Image (cartoon, rainbow, N blue to C red):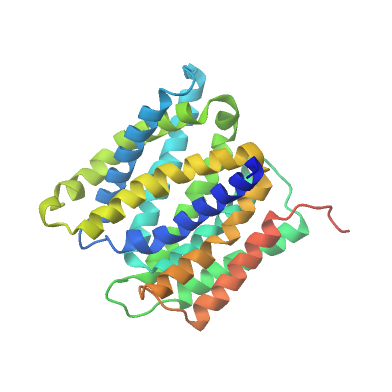
Amino acid sequence: MSKRTLAILAAITATTIYGLNHTIAKGVMPTYVKPFGFILIRVMGAAALFWTISFFGPKEKIERKDWGRIVLCAILGMVVNMLAFFKGLELSTPINSSILVTISPIIVVVLSALLIKEKITSKKGVGVALGFIGALLLIVFGAEIRQDAPNIPLGNALFILNATAYGTYLIIAKTLITKYHPFTLMKWLFTIALILNFPVGIGAFMEIEWNSMPLSVIGAIVFVVLGTTFMTYLFNVFALTQLKASTLSAFIYVQPLFGILFAVATGKDHLSLVKVLGTILVLLGVYFASRKGKEVS
Protein backbone atom coordinates (compact mmCIF):
# COMPACT_ATOMS: atom_id res chain seq x y z
CA MET A 1 0.00 0.00 0.00
CA SER A 2 1.44 3.39 -1.04
CA LYS A 3 2.05 6.25 1.39
CA ARG A 4 -0.52 8.35 -0.47
CA THR A 5 -3.16 5.66 0.02
CA LEU A 6 -2.27 5.48 3.71
CA ALA A 7 -2.52 9.27 3.92
CA ILE A 8 -6.01 9.20 2.39
CA LEU A 9 -7.05 6.48 4.85
CA ALA A 10 -5.63 8.55 7.71
CA ALA A 11 -7.62 11.60 6.58
CA ILE A 12 -10.81 9.55 6.26
CA THR A 13 -10.23 8.04 9.72
CA ALA A 14 -9.73 11.49 11.27
CA THR A 15 -12.90 12.78 9.60
CA THR A 16 -14.84 9.71 10.76
CA ILE A 17 -13.68 10.25 14.36
CA TYR A 18 -14.79 13.88 14.20
CA GLY A 19 -18.17 12.81 12.81
CA LEU A 20 -18.72 10.21 15.56
CA ASN A 21 -17.60 12.65 18.25
CA HIS A 22 -20.75 14.78 17.97
CA THR A 23 -22.96 11.94 19.18
CA ILE A 24 -20.49 10.23 21.53
CA ALA A 25 -19.58 13.40 23.45
CA LYS A 26 -23.25 14.41 23.58
CA GLY A 27 -24.07 11.13 25.35
CA VAL A 28 -21.78 12.03 28.25
CA MET A 29 -23.13 15.53 28.92
CA PRO A 30 -24.52 16.77 31.19
CA THR A 31 -25.67 13.62 33.05
CA TYR A 32 -22.20 12.34 33.89
CA VAL A 33 -19.86 15.24 33.07
CA LYS A 34 -20.73 18.89 32.55
CA PRO A 35 -19.28 20.56 29.43
CA PHE A 36 -16.58 22.65 31.11
CA GLY A 37 -15.47 19.71 33.25
CA PHE A 38 -15.24 17.63 30.06
CA ILE A 39 -13.01 20.26 28.47
CA LEU A 40 -10.66 20.15 31.47
CA ILE A 41 -10.40 16.36 31.08
CA ARG A 42 -9.78 16.79 27.37
CA VAL A 43 -6.96 19.35 27.61
CA MET A 44 -5.42 17.55 30.61
CA GLY A 45 -5.26 14.28 28.70
CA ALA A 46 -4.05 15.90 25.47
CA ALA A 47 -1.32 17.86 27.28
CA ALA A 48 -0.04 14.66 28.91
CA LEU A 49 -0.11 12.75 25.62
CA PHE A 50 1.62 15.48 23.59
CA TRP A 51 4.31 15.98 26.26
CA THR A 52 4.95 12.23 26.21
CA ILE A 53 5.23 12.02 22.43
CA SER A 54 7.31 15.23 22.25
CA PHE A 55 10.28 13.32 23.66
CA PHE A 56 10.41 11.49 20.33
CA GLY A 57 10.52 14.78 18.40
CA PRO A 58 13.19 17.48 18.03
CA LYS A 59 14.28 19.55 21.02
CA GLU A 60 13.11 23.07 20.17
CA LYS A 61 13.01 26.29 22.18
CA ILE A 62 10.19 28.76 21.59
CA GLU A 63 11.47 32.24 20.74
CA ARG A 64 10.37 34.98 23.13
CA LYS A 65 8.64 36.95 20.36
CA ASP A 66 6.38 33.97 19.56
CA TRP A 67 4.93 33.43 23.05
CA GLY A 68 2.23 36.08 22.62
CA ARG A 69 1.01 34.43 19.43
CA ILE A 70 1.11 30.99 21.09
CA VAL A 71 -0.98 32.19 24.04
CA LEU A 72 -3.52 33.78 21.67
CA CYS A 73 -3.68 30.55 19.66
CA ALA A 74 -4.33 28.55 22.83
CA ILE A 75 -7.12 30.95 23.87
CA LEU A 76 -8.83 30.72 20.49
CA GLY A 77 -8.12 27.10 19.54
CA MET A 78 -8.21 25.28 22.87
CA VAL A 79 -10.26 27.50 25.19
CA VAL A 80 -12.99 29.54 23.44
CA ASN A 81 -13.26 27.00 20.62
CA MET A 82 -13.64 23.95 22.87
CA LEU A 83 -15.78 25.56 25.57
CA ALA A 84 -18.22 26.94 22.98
CA PHE A 85 -18.45 23.61 21.14
CA PHE A 86 -19.07 21.42 24.19
CA LYS A 87 -21.54 23.86 25.78
CA GLY A 88 -23.30 24.13 22.42
CA LEU A 89 -23.41 20.33 22.18
CA GLU A 90 -25.10 20.17 25.60
CA LEU A 91 -27.75 22.68 24.49
CA SER A 92 -28.27 21.56 20.88
CA THR A 93 -28.19 18.32 18.85
CA PRO A 94 -25.45 16.16 17.26
CA ILE A 95 -26.73 16.78 13.72
CA ASN A 96 -26.74 20.56 14.19
CA SER A 97 -23.18 20.48 15.54
CA SER A 98 -21.90 18.23 12.74
CA ILE A 99 -23.37 20.64 10.17
CA LEU A 100 -22.38 23.96 11.72
CA VAL A 101 -18.82 22.93 12.63
CA THR A 102 -18.07 22.69 8.89
CA ILE A 103 -18.68 26.42 8.48
CA SER A 104 -15.06 27.04 9.59
CA PRO A 105 -13.73 27.43 5.99
CA ILE A 106 -16.30 30.18 5.41
CA ILE A 107 -15.25 31.92 8.63
CA VAL A 108 -11.61 31.66 7.49
CA VAL A 109 -12.48 33.38 4.18
CA VAL A 110 -14.22 36.27 5.96
CA LEU A 111 -11.53 36.67 8.63
CA SER A 112 -8.74 36.46 6.06
CA ALA A 113 -10.36 39.37 4.22
CA LEU A 114 -10.66 41.40 7.43
CA LEU A 115 -7.33 40.52 9.06
CA ILE A 116 -4.91 40.01 6.19
CA LYS A 117 -6.82 41.78 3.38
CA GLU A 118 -7.23 38.66 1.28
CA LYS A 119 -9.56 39.26 -1.66
CA ILE A 120 -12.99 37.63 -1.63
CA THR A 121 -13.87 36.52 -5.16
CA SER A 122 -17.44 36.35 -6.42
CA LYS A 123 -17.52 32.57 -5.97
CA LYS A 124 -16.29 32.89 -2.40
CA GLY A 125 -18.82 35.66 -1.80
CA VAL A 126 -21.63 33.37 -2.94
CA GLY A 127 -20.24 30.64 -0.68
CA VAL A 128 -20.14 32.95 2.34
CA ALA A 129 -23.73 34.06 1.71
CA LEU A 130 -25.08 30.51 1.27
CA GLY A 131 -23.22 29.25 4.34
CA PHE A 132 -24.51 31.99 6.60
CA ILE A 133 -28.08 31.57 5.30
CA GLY A 134 -27.88 27.86 6.11
CA ALA A 135 -26.46 28.59 9.56
CA LEU A 136 -29.14 31.19 10.29
CA LEU A 137 -31.83 28.78 9.10
CA LEU A 138 -30.67 26.23 11.67
CA ILE A 139 -30.35 28.82 14.45
CA VAL A 140 -33.70 30.55 13.90
CA PHE A 141 -35.93 27.73 12.64
CA GLY A 142 -34.12 24.62 13.89
CA ALA A 143 -35.52 24.74 17.42
CA GLU A 144 -37.28 21.62 18.72
CA ILE A 145 -38.72 20.57 22.04
CA ARG A 146 -36.21 18.01 23.34
CA GLN A 147 -35.25 17.09 26.87
CA ASP A 148 -31.61 16.54 25.89
CA ALA A 149 -31.42 19.80 23.90
CA PRO A 150 -32.82 22.56 26.17
CA ASN A 151 -31.80 25.58 24.08
CA ILE A 152 -31.11 24.71 20.46
CA PRO A 153 -30.88 28.30 19.10
CA LEU A 154 -28.27 29.26 21.74
CA GLY A 155 -26.43 25.98 21.21
CA ASN A 156 -26.31 26.57 17.45
CA ALA A 157 -25.06 30.14 18.02
CA LEU A 158 -22.27 28.69 20.19
CA PHE A 159 -21.30 26.39 17.30
CA ILE A 160 -20.86 29.53 15.17
CA LEU A 161 -18.68 31.04 17.92
CA ASN A 162 -16.74 27.79 17.98
CA ALA A 163 -16.16 27.95 14.22
CA THR A 164 -15.19 31.65 14.39
CA ALA A 165 -12.65 31.05 17.17
CA TYR A 166 -11.19 28.05 15.34
CA GLY A 167 -11.03 29.93 12.02
CA THR A 168 -9.16 32.81 13.68
CA TYR A 169 -6.85 30.31 15.35
CA LEU A 170 -5.96 28.77 11.97
CA ILE A 171 -4.99 32.15 10.56
CA ILE A 172 -2.90 33.20 13.57
CA ALA A 173 -1.24 29.78 13.94
CA LYS A 174 -0.16 29.63 10.29
CA THR A 175 3.32 31.10 10.89
CA LEU A 176 3.86 28.95 13.99
CA ILE A 177 3.02 25.73 12.16
CA THR A 178 5.71 26.39 9.54
CA LYS A 179 8.28 27.36 12.18
CA TYR A 180 7.97 24.68 14.88
CA HIS A 181 7.54 20.92 14.91
CA PRO A 182 3.91 19.90 15.58
CA PHE A 183 4.85 18.06 18.79
CA THR A 184 6.59 21.14 20.18
CA LEU A 185 3.74 23.45 19.27
CA MET A 186 0.93 21.24 20.50
CA LYS A 187 2.50 20.40 23.86
CA TRP A 188 2.77 24.12 24.68
CA LEU A 189 -0.64 25.03 23.29
CA PHE A 190 -2.34 22.36 25.37
CA THR A 191 -0.28 23.22 28.46
CA ILE A 192 -1.41 26.85 28.24
CA ALA A 193 -4.97 25.66 27.51
CA LEU A 194 -4.86 23.49 30.64
CA ILE A 195 -3.84 26.50 32.77
CA LEU A 196 -6.54 28.73 31.25
CA ASN A 197 -9.31 26.11 31.36
CA PHE A 198 -8.52 25.04 34.92
CA PRO A 199 -10.42 27.81 36.78
CA VAL A 200 -13.36 27.47 34.36
CA GLY A 201 -13.69 23.70 34.56
CA ILE A 202 -12.39 22.65 37.98
CA GLY A 203 -15.79 23.07 39.67
CA ALA A 204 -17.55 20.79 37.18
CA PHE A 205 -14.59 18.39 37.24
CA MET A 206 -14.81 17.99 41.03
CA GLU A 207 -18.53 17.12 40.72
CA ILE A 208 -17.80 14.03 38.59
CA GLU A 209 -18.75 10.79 40.35
CA TRP A 210 -16.19 8.43 38.85
CA ASN A 211 -17.15 5.45 41.03
CA SER A 212 -20.72 5.33 39.72
CA MET A 213 -19.86 6.08 36.11
CA PRO A 214 -20.76 3.30 33.61
CA LEU A 215 -17.92 1.77 31.61
CA SER A 216 -19.58 2.96 28.39
CA VAL A 217 -19.29 6.58 29.56
CA ILE A 218 -15.66 6.12 30.58
CA GLY A 219 -15.08 4.65 27.13
CA ALA A 220 -16.69 7.72 25.55
CA ILE A 221 -14.41 10.03 27.55
CA VAL A 222 -11.36 8.02 26.47
CA PHE A 223 -12.56 8.26 22.86
CA VAL A 224 -12.80 12.06 23.06
CA VAL A 225 -9.36 12.48 24.67
CA LEU A 226 -7.44 9.82 22.77
CA GLY A 227 -9.39 9.83 19.50
CA THR A 228 -10.89 13.27 18.89
CA THR A 229 -8.12 15.31 20.53
CA PHE A 230 -4.92 13.30 20.03
CA MET A 231 -5.16 10.74 17.22
CA THR A 232 -6.98 12.99 14.75
CA TYR A 233 -4.20 15.55 14.94
CA LEU A 234 -1.54 12.89 14.34
CA PHE A 235 -3.50 11.40 11.44
CA ASN A 236 -3.91 14.84 9.84
CA VAL A 237 -0.20 15.61 10.28
CA PHE A 238 0.70 12.36 8.53
CA ALA A 239 -1.85 13.04 5.78
CA LEU A 240 -0.28 16.45 5.15
CA THR A 241 3.08 14.77 4.41
CA GLN A 242 1.53 13.14 1.33
CA LEU A 243 -1.46 15.34 0.44
CA LYS A 244 -1.91 19.02 -0.32
CA ALA A 245 -3.57 21.09 2.39
CA SER A 246 -6.41 21.88 -0.04
CA THR A 247 -6.94 18.15 -0.63
CA LEU A 248 -6.99 17.41 3.09
CA SER A 249 -9.42 20.26 3.80
CA ALA A 250 -11.86 18.76 1.27
CA PHE A 251 -12.50 15.90 3.70
CA ILE A 252 -14.49 18.36 5.86
CA TYR A 253 -17.38 17.83 3.42
CA VAL A 254 -17.65 14.22 4.58
CA GLN A 255 -17.84 14.99 8.30
CA PRO A 256 -21.56 15.91 8.37
CA LEU A 257 -22.34 12.69 6.47
CA PHE A 258 -20.67 10.53 9.13
CA GLY A 259 -22.10 12.68 11.92
CA ILE A 260 -25.67 12.54 10.61
CA LEU A 261 -25.60 8.82 9.76
CA PHE A 262 -24.21 7.88 13.18
CA ALA A 263 -26.63 10.14 15.07
CA VAL A 264 -29.65 8.77 13.18
CA ALA A 265 -28.45 5.12 13.34
CA THR A 266 -28.00 5.28 17.12
CA GLY A 267 -31.32 7.05 17.61
CA LYS A 268 -29.68 10.10 19.17
CA ASP A 269 -31.06 12.54 16.60
CA HIS A 270 -33.37 12.69 13.60
CA LEU A 271 -33.55 14.48 10.30
CA SER A 272 -36.04 17.25 9.50
CA LEU A 273 -36.69 19.43 6.47
CA VAL A 274 -34.95 22.39 8.14
CA LYS A 275 -31.87 20.29 8.93
CA VAL A 276 -31.68 18.90 5.40
CA LEU A 277 -32.06 22.35 3.83
CA GLY A 278 -29.58 23.88 6.28
CA THR A 279 -27.08 21.10 5.53
CA ILE A 280 -27.34 21.63 1.78
CA LEU A 281 -26.86 25.41 2.09
CA VAL A 282 -23.91 25.12 4.50
CA LEU A 283 -22.11 22.49 2.39
CA LEU A 284 -22.72 24.45 -0.82
CA GLY A 285 -21.39 27.52 0.96
CA VAL A 286 -18.26 25.69 2.14
CA TYR A 287 -17.75 24.30 -1.38
CA PHE A 288 -17.89 27.68 -3.10
CA ALA A 289 -15.91 29.45 -0.35
CA SER A 290 -13.15 26.84 -0.58
CA ARG A 291 -12.89 26.77 -4.40
CA LYS A 292 -9.85 28.18 -6.09
CA GLY A 293 -9.84 29.54 -9.58
CA LYS A 294 -9.67 32.61 -11.73
CA GLU A 295 -12.20 35.31 -11.13
CA VAL A 296 -14.71 35.63 -13.95
CA SER A 297 -15.25 39.22 -14.99
Relative depth, front residue between 220 and 116: 220
Residue located 24% across and 59% down the image: 216
**129 lies left or right of 35:** right
Relative depth, front residue between 129 and 99: 99
The percent coordinates of residue 220 (x first, y second) are 30, 56
The percent coordinates of residue 131 (x first, y second) are 60, 65
The percent coordinates of residue 284 (x first, y second) are 65, 67
Residue located 20% across and 50% down the image: 204
Quadrant showing the C terminus: bottom right
Residue located 64% across and 64% down the image: 285
**218 lies left or right of 71:** left
The percent coordinates of residue 219 (x first, y second) are 28, 54
Relative depth, front residue between 50 and 37: 50
Q: Quadrant of residue 128?
A: bottom right
Q: Check the image and report above or below for 172 versus 264.
A: above
Give the number of callouts. Answer: 0
Res. 180 in view: yes
Res. 128 in view: no
